[in-house]
Amino acid sequence: MNQDRELIKDQTDQDLLITHIFNAPRELVFKAWTNSEQLKRWYAPENCTIEFRHIDIKEGGTFHSCIKNPNYDDCWAKGVYLEIDAPKKLVYSMENTDEFGNDVVITQHQNWPLKTIVTVTFEDFDGKTKLTLHQNAPEKVARQTGAYPSWIEMLNHLEADILH
């Protein structure tokens, strides 16, 4: 019985994991994640825009961005590009900040980690690209905060941008 409870607990505490199939070569999909001009076009949820205070896409490079949402407060984040293995893998950190880059705690979502690591892998898949996004934050919390549906919307924007 305890094993069953542990299994249920593990399932509800699983990290955020999303897979998306793109009808495009992985080099093209990877480039959309590592080209700042392309990121500006798709890296925001529905009805939102993104602004980069700065972005330096290279291993050890940093970014400071703001997703502007007309219905909520601005969402500032900063991070460091930890690994860039073209066209296979991209790993970066993300922390919630204020507009000056100071760390902030999102008080309405106390279970959201102060810092997350986002790992995006790109695989050839029957002439398409299989993208897998992993973020070390509980999926249940990601659904509550809106992070999960935001990722889905952003990946859909990316697909539209690539196919445009």
Image (cartoon, rainbow, N blue to C red):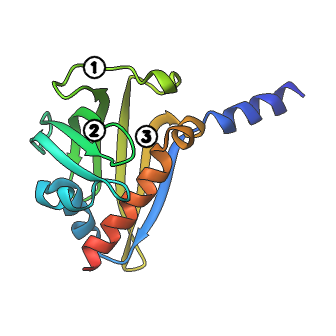
**Above or below 58: residue 124:** below
Q: Could you tell me which secondary element the residue under label 1 belongs to?
A: loop
How busy is the neighbourhood of tag 3: few (under 14 within 10 Å), some, or many (20 plus)?
Answer: many
Q: Which residue is mark 3?
A: 135
Q: Position of residue 136 (x, y in %)?
A: 46, 34
Local secondary structure at mark 3 = strand
Q: Mark 2 or 1 closer to N-term?
A: 2
| Residue 97 x %, y % | 27, 26
Foreground pick, 131 / 140:
140
Horizontal placement of 79 versus 135: left or right? left
Mark 3 near mark 2, Cβ–Cβ under 8 Å? no
Q: Residue at x 33, y 65 (%)?
A: 157
Residue 103, labelled with which disc? Answer: 1
- Number of marks drawn: 3
Residue extending farthest front: 71
* Residue placed under numbered mark 2 in the picture: 92
